[in-house]
Image (cartoon, grey):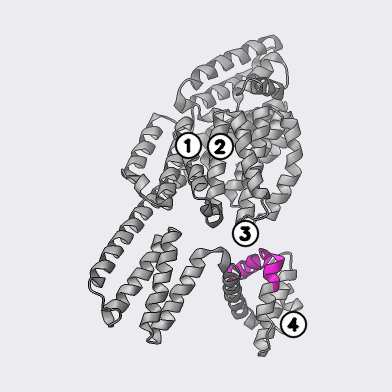
Amino acid sequence: MPNEAGESVFQLIKSLTRSEKRHFRLSADRPGAAEDLKFLQLFDALDQLPHYDEERILTLAPAIKKVQLANLKANLYRQLLSDLRLYHAGQNVDIQLHEQLGYARVLYNKGFYQQSLKMLDKVKNIAYQQQLSHIALLALDFEKLIESQFITRSLEGRAEELASESAGTAGQVSQLHTLSNAALQMYGLYLKTGHARNQQDYEQVTAFFRTTLLPTNVQRGGFFEQLYYYQAHVWYYTIVQDFRAGYRYAYKWVELFEHTPDMKNQQTMLYIKGVHNLLAYLFNTLYYSRFREVLATLKAFAADPNRRSTPNIEALLFQYIATNEINLHFLEGRFTEGLTLIPGLLGQLDEYRLQLDMHRRLVFYYKIASLYFGSGDNEKAIEYLTKIIQFKEVSLREDIQCFARILNLIAHYEAGQDEALDYQIKSVYRFLGKMNEQQQMQVAIFRFLRTVGDLTPGELKGAFTNLKNQLIAIAVNPLERRPFLYLDIISWLESKIENVPVQEIMQRKFRAMK
């Protein structure tokens, strides 16, 4: 069995680009002891392997003894991280600033206090410019240490000046942490529960949001204070399904980067995540023309050869562009054409397997299943829904877990798998009972599917019409609209009533969009 340390260094090596590997080999390939040669042999052995395998490592690097392997792996891991830190320092201001803080410490230890203070002043100025107030506070604390112990500048009022600057910066850092905590907690709540299911959920989420995000004059704050403030609102309005209000804050999120374009390069991941959330709101409000514009903006950014690039950024761009290209096909009702995206999507899911967590994989599986269902291939839809249903950690995205089971029921009905339908219905009832997840739409579908097998062909159209009318009435309640975000059951019923493919119904609705 591979151990954690072995997997960590193996994954890190597999994530390296060609230029990163060349840089590491050049820095590590220096005359030295036999241990240095073993160090590089281990790197080369791990680089060759498709999967982590200790027996194969020892075969490929015979100079390495099994008892040496653990220490060599740990040392290699540290050396790789150290080399990557140097390699990417030019793209990361925070790495540069921490490095200069280290230089200030070296000068201080040598007794060069004025030089150390000069270095700290430089760190502070850049940190303030880049709105990295937490790093500025570290420099201030070090500066106070030097000023309090040694005769340096001896300027009148220096103590008061430092104390005032520290208090102001500490207050900014405190507000920044409060806002970032609020954004993180709202995002965590969304990942766990998805959208509010009923009035009780709405009231609990709203009370939590108001307690977590205390009143603040965000316009007086810096870039990150505003960003976290907008993020917290985006997640809150996503949970309570107020998509128009959420759109305003997603738009503010993206506009913040447009007004400070340097931050697109410094905080690329946060920028593209903001664009993705803006697209999600446009999708949920069916604002098709604006959706296309924003998607084109995201794709143009991805194609820019001058933008910042890291494996994490590339994985996120893949995720966000692929998700929204599928959503574009959903809006246009072009499910069959959307199937052409799947082979490339599956290939990239494998390519970015180290960067994408299971939550994101589940979302893709659901979207792939929806494409197959909309195109009429129920067997393939069931195949991908089963991947979600069999995932053991049901506390992760309970909403996806729930609606995968609902869509699975309908796909079994459409596929004519009546012998499995009764079992599926009982299974889903048990699951939803444990999750406390039943809503009116789900109950109505269960009742329909339980009785539809007893209906004559002549009675089916009336039964579909009655169910459609029930669901339209249910959807009037904003807190009951959540199921319809995951499954356009109304369009499916209309396709059954009119006896036409569901994508034809979707295309008709698309022509009416703005």
Secondary structure at badge 4 equals loop
Q: CA distance from mark 4 to mark 3?
A: 34 Å
| Of callouts 2 and 1, the N-terminal one | 1
Secondary structure at badge 2 equals helix
Measured as percent of width and height from the top left, residue 40 is found at: 69, 79
Q: Which residues are magenta?
A: 1-22
Residue found at the very far bottom of the displayed protein: 33
Q: CA distance from mark 2 to mark 1?
A: 9 Å
Q: CA distance from mark 4 to mark 2?
A: 54 Å
Measured as percent of width and height from the top left, residue 28 is found at: 66, 80
Magenta span includes 19: yes
- Mark 3 or mark 1, which is nearer to you? 3
Q: Residue at x 63, y 47 (%)?
A: 301
Q: Amino acid at mark 2?
A: Ala
Please give the count of numbered marks on the rendered protein. Answer: 4
| Of callouts 4 and 2, the N-terminal one | 4
Question: In the image shown, does 443 or 129 lie closer to the viewer?
Answer: 129
Q: Which residue is mark 1?
A: 238
- Mark 4 or mark 2, which is nearer to you? 2
Callout 2–callout 1 Cβ contact below 8 Å: yes
Q: Which residue is mark 3?
A: 310
Height in image: 34 above or below 259?
A: below
Let me know if residue 122 appears in the view. yes
Mark number, residue 436: none
Q: Amino acid at mark 3?
A: Thr
Q: Main secondary structure of the magenta part?
A: helix
Q: Amino acid at mark 1?
A: Thr
Question: In the image shown, does 35 or 93 lie closer to the viewer?
Answer: 93
Q: Which residue is mark 4?
A: 62
